[in-house]
Amino acid sequence: MKLHYHTLSLAVLMALPAVAAAQSRTTDLDDVTVTATRTPVAVEASVVPVQLIDRDQIDRSQANSVLELLRGRAGLDFANQGGTGKITSLFLRGTNSNQVLVLVDGVRVGSATSGMAALQDLPVDQIERVEIVRGPRSSLYGSEAIGGVIQIFTRTAGQGLQQNLSITAGSNNLRQASAGFSNRGERGWISAQGGYQKTDGINACRGTAAGWGAGCFADEPDRDGYRNTSINVRGGYALTDTLSLEGHVLNADSFNEYDGSIFGGNEADNRQQVYGGKLAWAASDAFQLTAQVGRNRDQADNYFAANGSRTFASNFDTRRDTASVQGDFQFAEGQQLTAGADWQNDKVTSSTAYDIGDRDNLGVFVEYQGQFGAHSLQASVRNDDNEQFGNHTTGSLGYGFAFGNGFRLTASAGTGFKAPTFNDLYYPGFSNPDLKPEESKSLNIGIAQYADNWNWTLNAYETRVDQLIGYDSSFNIVNVAEARIRGAELTGYLSLAGFDINAQASFTDPRDHTSGAATYDNLLARRARTSGRLDVDKSFGPVRLGVTAAGSGHRFDNAANTVRLAGYGTVDVRAEYAINDAWSVQAKAANVFDRAYETVAWYNQPGREYQLTLRYRSK
């Protein structure tokens, strides 16, 4: 296994000097991000590291989950508990899953109890594009954006009537289908998409009777299946030449089997819902005003199934209602001021009795963006007034300098925070209502070079997180822990002789820096120090071939660093044949060398898998 990982690392590192920014650039739209500044900014002009993944790249990757799509990309690491649909923790630049903000079409998503977004239940077929911002953005978005922001945009509409269909079958009895249409007229547009996914899965946890209680605290050597049914509808209408209205609905219902007990259950019925509406008024070329409302519902009903019967175990139903208003004012050429306010209400309904079940947060922010020839500047500040912990202020400052031949130097600094979750504050017997927010300080320095057929970026950073929520020597939950995270990310893209080459490597050193703790200077649990990904694609007329190599170095499963999980590398090969302009057939073999590995101790990952897809997309 070590030899395969070292081979992967060498391949990535050899490719990187000649390649760059992990996304190929196809249209002007693909080069624009809105997440980094809450306004449209070209990727090349961003003063903080950003990465984009569009629908064409999603189709070519043949990914069946958000985990597959994002695995190995710069700054990202995952810990998955047993394959498709199982709980997945995302670490961005070494920060915790609950320190990464996830948005869907501008709506904040995630459980108010656990603090995590259920990325495993978000269907890939509903996604139009993904924007990844690495580094703190609390000065624009408030809580959770310590490690960065991941925004998922669901499918929108191109010009005229367009239709799509895909049908997939594969290993572990995978059955998957997706279909939808979109239409854009002179003033209005609509997009609708439905999807279905079902797999028998793998044995999620390798616990045995001899080692009962290891990993999943259960002995259930069976397949743990997963099923997801989803629908997404987006639409908009230009009420006047300056006023437009947009709305969207995403609903994903899933059934998940896992290895568990009568106390925690071994089956779950989950629901992810995202609703949103936006009213935009372009008063002039210099001023725009946007108002947006949204709701995210994260529901989990857990059961214990045995001997043909099903017993209720627990229910957690959290709801996040949000509303915002934002004004963008361009007061001079290349000079823009943005100001706004965000309101949020979190509400918990559960079979577990929480002392308090809801809370409000009001955030106000202001941002300046300026362009002075080769120089660019971005600065923002925000204050959040939370019903539970009071006021908290964050800020950021970024600078960029373009010094010819496509070279660009950037530097940014920012603070972030994460509000305690309802579990931290009010879970019976394991909480502390006096907890304060976790706080961070980050610095990033980057250099990049952009050309027509190639580009590359290199970023180095340090993040320090204080008042981390943890347990003291008496097992009371308190703001006691500290962390120091240092790292670097190298990404690249090259188009040469018909080959599209994307490469990226991440080097992260996430350390426990809690003064006086026995774990001082240990690596934070479940984060690998090194990871990488290499994608190579080539077209031969109607045939397109591709390979993806991804891997990770070793990690420790516990804070004491006594449980070591070996590094791993996997290789996927892909093929696609265009029958005509609309129809194509795709085939994929994942983990072709059948590598066995774990990202969480005792929890299995899929071995070699195959799949075949028939795809239609009208032009």
Image: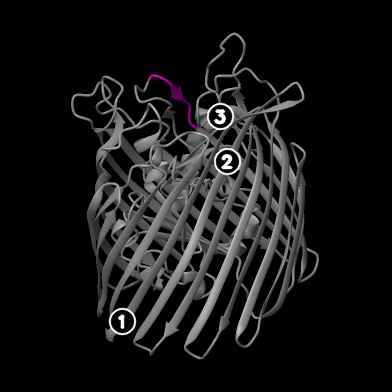
Image location (x, y in percent) of residue 198: 73, 43
The image quadrant of residue 217 is: top right
At label 3, the amino acid type is: Tyr
| Residue holding disc 1 | 329
| Residue holding disc 2 | 300
- Disc with the residue nearer the chain's start (2 vs 1): 2
How many marks can you see?
Answer: 3
**Does 449 sit above or below residue 239?**
above
**Does 214 sit above or below residue 505?**
above
Q: CA distance from mark 2 to mark 1?
A: 42 Å
Question: Residue 92 magenta-drawn?
Answer: no
Instruction: Name the image quarter holding the N terminus.
Output: top right
Q: CA distance from mark 3 to mark 2?
A: 28 Å
Residue at the image point whose x is 43% and y is 32% from the top: 526
**Does 494 sit above or below residue 215?**
below
Q: Are marks 1 and 3 in contact (CB under 8 Å)?
A: no
Decide whether the magenta segment is chiefly helix, strand or loop: loop
Residue at the image point whose x is 60% and y is 70% from the top: 156
Q: Is residue 332 left or right of residue 11?
A: left
Q: Is residue 269 left or right of residue 344?
A: right
Please state the extent of the stretch shown in magenta in the rendering.
562-567
| Residue holding disc 3 | 597
Q: Element under label 1?
A: strand
Q: Are marks 3 and 2 in contact (CB under 8 Å)?
A: no
Bin the neighbour count of mark 2 within 10 Å (Cα to Cα): few under 14, some 14-19, many 20 and up: many
Q: How is the image coloured?
A: one colour
Question: Residue 563 magenta-drawn?
Answer: yes
